[in-house]
Amino acid sequence: MIGLQIGKTVFRAPEVEQPEAPEETILSTKKLSFWYGEKRALDGISMEIPVRQVTAIIGPSGCGKSTYLRCFNRMNELIPGSNFDGAVEYRGRDINDGRVDPVSIRRQIGMVFQKPNPFPKSIYDNIVFGAKVNGMSADMDELVETSLRKAALWDEVKNDLKQSGLALSGGQQQRLCIARALAVEPEVILMDEPCSALDPIATTRIEDLIRTLRETYTIVIVTHNMQQAARVSDKTAFFTVGESGGGELVEFDDTQRLFTTPSDPRTEAYITGRFG
Amino acid sequence: MSEMTEAPRRGGVEALGDLTSRGPARKRRAIFERAIQAVLFACAAISILTTFGIVATLLGETIQFLRQVSIVDFLTGTRWTPLFASKHFGVLPLVNGTIAVAFVAMVVALPVGILTAIFLSEYAPTRFRSVLKPILEVLAGIPTVVYGYFALLFITPILREIFPQTGIFNVASAGIVMGFMILPMMASISEDALRAVPSGLREGAYALGATKYQTVTRVVVPGALSGILAAVILSISRAIGETMIVAIAAGLQPKMGFNLLQSMETMTAYIVQVSLGDTPQDTIEFQTIFAVGTLLFLMTFVMNVVSDWLVRRFREAYE
């Protein structure tokens, strides 16, 4: 039996290969390259992200994983001097097409950031912000409750929704940010190292939450923590810094297979801790 | 790594000997250190002592003044004629004039300053910003006497074209120009406050589908509100204390009322008038300027304290 131990998590290769069910792709990139000014950040990445699964992106620092994630909701275009080549498709539609409104893309594809960034407003106002700017006419009280429940934060804050989002602990703030993203009813949630600023207990709660959310949402999570990728994701992509200085996709596979029987020696070296 | 493990060994026993030395070199070092400390303390003490000296003088003369005029008459009287034969010591006309000019100044500086700050911080391309910022700073560097003549010789004639009843000396012209004068400060402090709003909040708003305008109006400006308020209060405080523009362009007639096209005298202009005139010292006329000065000092002091508190509260918000 082939087994691999990373930290305390032990992975075992599946005994029987399951027949591959055809997966529906929701997001994909075709030969996507990206530059910050003269500096190349991504080098020709082609990848298909399946619907209603958790896809993790791992790799060493500077391999462009966050940059890649931010291409899906066009957050990178806010950075002056950035440039890209290739295509990013959401349900088969090129999101960088001149007719596509970035605002409507971001409503479909939500994002949770590395550092919890609740607005300096009440918990209630944090949740309804997205609905208000998008002109959604929902019952706001109900929206606040359902969103907070989905993010497993309701029971902790239900008695004081008027308190500032900044008064919460780091882990609660991050769950508030997840609730805020869920409130605009997106289809995809992008998570950029959502636990890197959190303690282990708060991290566990977010990971539990990610596993619950995968029933309804497509989640793409960037993490520097391989155990986290192994714990929460269905599929894992391994990025590394290529010859050009930009991030390259080395391997993209089912999480279990990637961590047990990686096909590329660079992946094996990384997950066994020999580099990165 | 290897260097680090070697380094401490090199000193060894010798270094330990140095630790307990009581040689003359050590004594010299100690004296030098103490001397430096004393010089630095003396420099710091100068500014503190000066402040105390000024406050003591102001208060001393003010007490002399209040022995002859009741504080109630001073603070609530509406006639200010200390230099005339029939003397009245009601300071309200001067306060009225001061507030009127500051009001006009803020009507100009507040919207233009905040909108400039928003433009600089959120909209201006880096290159444009690097041109506009120095220009604003030049505006801040113009001597106030130049602003004063600009008000009297340029703005006032324009006002008199539009409103023929405008006086040669009038509140509006002085206030408008004062607004331009405090505009750079207003814009600069507000811009600092806006830029201090973490970029993560902007990204958070964009990621929820907010447009740029929504991000600015619903997240960035509210997030910077206490900093902007501090800018407003500091600007008002500056407008109240400004002397040269009002002395040149607003006139020297202590008047109550709201007619901004007429001449009014501000507290600062009155102090200039008396201190430059031939009023003998140790008279009640001369003491009035200290009483007015004390009141002015208290007004600006309170405002600076409030703005300081707001800035501190603002900083705490994101830490």
Image: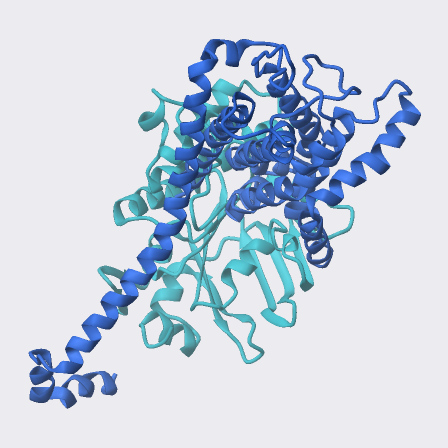
Chain colours: A cyan, B blue
Quarter residue A105 falls in: top right
Looking at the image, which residue is at 79% across and 36% down?
A: B151
Relative to B209, residue B68 above or below: above
In percent of width and height, residue B140 lies at: 67, 48
Relative to A125, residue B123 above or below: below
Relative to the observer, which residue lies in front, B273 or A40? B273
Q: Is residue B301 left or right of residue A15?
A: right
In percent of width and height, residue A143 lies at: 50, 23
In percent of width and height, residue A148 lies at: 41, 29
Q: Is residue A144 left or right of residue A107?
A: left
Residue A103, visible in the rendered structure: no
Relative to the observer, which residue lies in front, A209 or B196? B196
Residue B50, visible in the rendered structure: yes
Quarter residue B77 falls in: top right
Quadrant for the C terminus of chain B in the image:
top left
Looking at the image, which residue is at 31% across and 56% down?
A: B41
Quadrant for the N terminus of chain B in the image:
bottom left
Total numbered badges shown on the rendered structure = 0
Relative to A147, residue A87 above or below: below
In percent of width and height, residue A183 lies at: 51, 31
Relative to B5, residue A76 above or below: above
Looking at the image, which residue is at 37% across and 45% down?
A: B49
Q: Is residue A72 left or right of residue B315?
A: right
Relative to the observer, which residue lies in front, B303 or A128? B303
Looking at the image, which residue is at 78% across and 46% down?
A: A99
